Image (cartoon, helix red, strand yellow):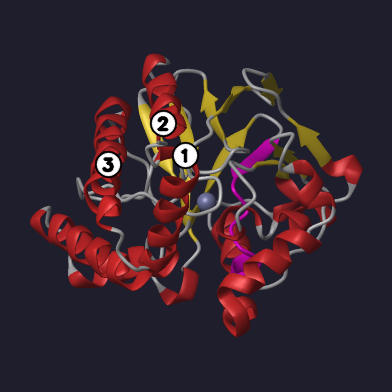
């Protein structure tokens, strides 16, 4: 069965298709996939209202993981009675977001508030912790939580029957109408082998449609997952090729920028769209993620 899924563009930093949340109506109201950041709650609310619903009608929010662009407004939703679904490892950070906020502040410094807004705690009675393969029924929707590490250890993809899978960041980022998939290769848990295994797991489940949080629903899940696996393989080739030459982080950032721009533009991504991808996924962060992954997991041991 095909369920109505509405893409809510959260207009992050006044950009189209940067960050989305998804609104899925069901027999007892509606659920959201992702809350988006704390800085876009107005856009979230307006998006819900544009489909004739109110935040009061939202029963659940399914968080793929707890990074600020996906889960920042979860506490705000919880305050309004919404149940927050999350991975067991993500849950403590929603109860006590202090550590998460401190580490994000180290990265984003004085831009923290303007980018991400407030990250409120989620009270314990509003948390719903989902194990791998766990099924929940929300109204008339049958949902399965699929643990999918690689981008972060605590990542979940959510399937609604075989109709659609919501892939957070594990399915990469892709602009509507484009075949270019870029991966948010963030430290400190980036692990390319786990990422590839997660994508193969999703492929084996034969979903029809796929919805990465950045930033739209695509009709052919298999094709999208194949493009994402190719992007993981490219990232692995890149570290194997470049890291043995021991580049500085500045040199590595430059190499990644050149390679990514070349590939994106050859696949028809516009300069403006590439900027949007960079706003949500700064390439200096991907360089740091890949370098850490190389040093921690991949560097050949003598
Ligand atoms: Zn993420």
In the rendered structure, find residue 297 and report the number of the disc placed on it.
Answer: 1
| Image coords of residue 208 (percent x, y) | 35, 23
Can residue 127 be found in the magenta stretch? no
Please, what secondary structure does the residue beneath circle 3 have? Answer: helix
Among numbered discs 3 and 2, the one appearing first in the sequence: 2
Q: Which residue is mark 3?
A: 231
**C-beta proximity under 8 Å, tags 1 and 2:** yes
Taking depth in this image into account, of 214 and 112 the one nearest to the observer is 112
Placement of 104 over or under 160, stated as above or below? below
Q: Which SS class for mark 1?
A: helix
Tell me whether the residue at label 3 lies in contact with that at label 2, contact meaning CB atoms closer than 8 angstroms: no
User: What is the crowding at mark 2: few (fewer than 14 residues within 10 Å), some, or many (at least 20)?
Assistant: some
Asked if residue 15 can be seen in this view, the reply is: yes
Mark-to-mark CA distance, 1 and 2: 10 Å
Point out the stretch of residues depicted in magenta: 29-42
- Toward the viewer: 242 or 222? 242
Tell which circle, 1 or 2, labels the residue nearer the N-terminal end: 2
Percent position of residue 86, x then y: 70, 38
Which residue position holds label 2? Answer: 193
Q: Quadrant of the C terminus?
A: top left
Outermost residue toward the bottom?
Answer: 110
Spot occupied by residue 192 in the image (x, y as percentages of width and height):
40, 37
Q: Is residue 95 above or below residue 287?
A: above
- The crowd level at tag 1 (other Cα within 10 Å; few <14, some 14-19, many 20+) is few
Residue 189 percent coordinates (x, y): 55, 45
Determine the image quadrant of residue 235: top left
164 vs 126, left or right, is left
- Residue 175 visible? The answer is no
Residue closer to the observer: 258 or 277: 258
Q: Nearer the viewer, mark 1 or mark 2?
A: 1
């Amino acid at each position: 069965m095909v369920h109505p899924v509405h893409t809510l563009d959260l207009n992050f930093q006044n950009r189209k298709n940067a960050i989305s949340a998804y609104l899925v109506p069901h027999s007892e109201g509606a659920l959201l996939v992702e809350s988006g950041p704390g800085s876009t709650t107005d856009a979230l609310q307006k998006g819900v209202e544009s489909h004739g619903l109110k935040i009061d009608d939202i029963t659940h929010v399914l968080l793929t993981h707890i990074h600020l662009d996906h889960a920042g407004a979860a506490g705000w939703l919880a305050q309004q009675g919404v149940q927050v679904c999350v991975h067991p490892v993500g849950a403590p950070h929603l109860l006590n977001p202090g550590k998460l906020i401190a580490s994000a502040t180290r990265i984003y410094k004085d831009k923290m508030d303007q980018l991400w807004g407030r990250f409120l705690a989620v009270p314990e009675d509003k948390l719903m912790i989902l194990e791998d393969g766990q099924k929940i029924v929300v109204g008339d929707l049958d949902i399965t939580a699929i643990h999918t590490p690689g981008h972060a250890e605590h990542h979940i993809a959510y399937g609604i029957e075989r109709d659609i899978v919501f892939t957070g960041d594990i399915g990469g980022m892709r602009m509507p109408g484009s075949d270019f998939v870029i991966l948010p290769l963030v430290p400190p848990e980036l692990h390319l082998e786990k990422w590839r295994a997660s994508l193969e797991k999703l492929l084996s489940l034969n979903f029809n449609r796929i919805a990465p949080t950045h930033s739209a629903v695509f009709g052919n899940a298999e094709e999208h997952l194949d493009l994402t696996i190719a992007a993981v393989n490219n990232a692995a080739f890149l570290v194997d090729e470049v890291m043995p030459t021991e580049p500085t982080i500045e040199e590595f950032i430059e190499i990644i920028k050149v390679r990514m721009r070349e590939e994106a533009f050859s696949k028809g991504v516009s300069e403006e769209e590439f900027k949007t991808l960079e706003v949500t996924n700064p390439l200096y962060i991907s360089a740091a993620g890949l370098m850490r992954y190389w040093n921690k997991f991949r560097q050949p041991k003598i």
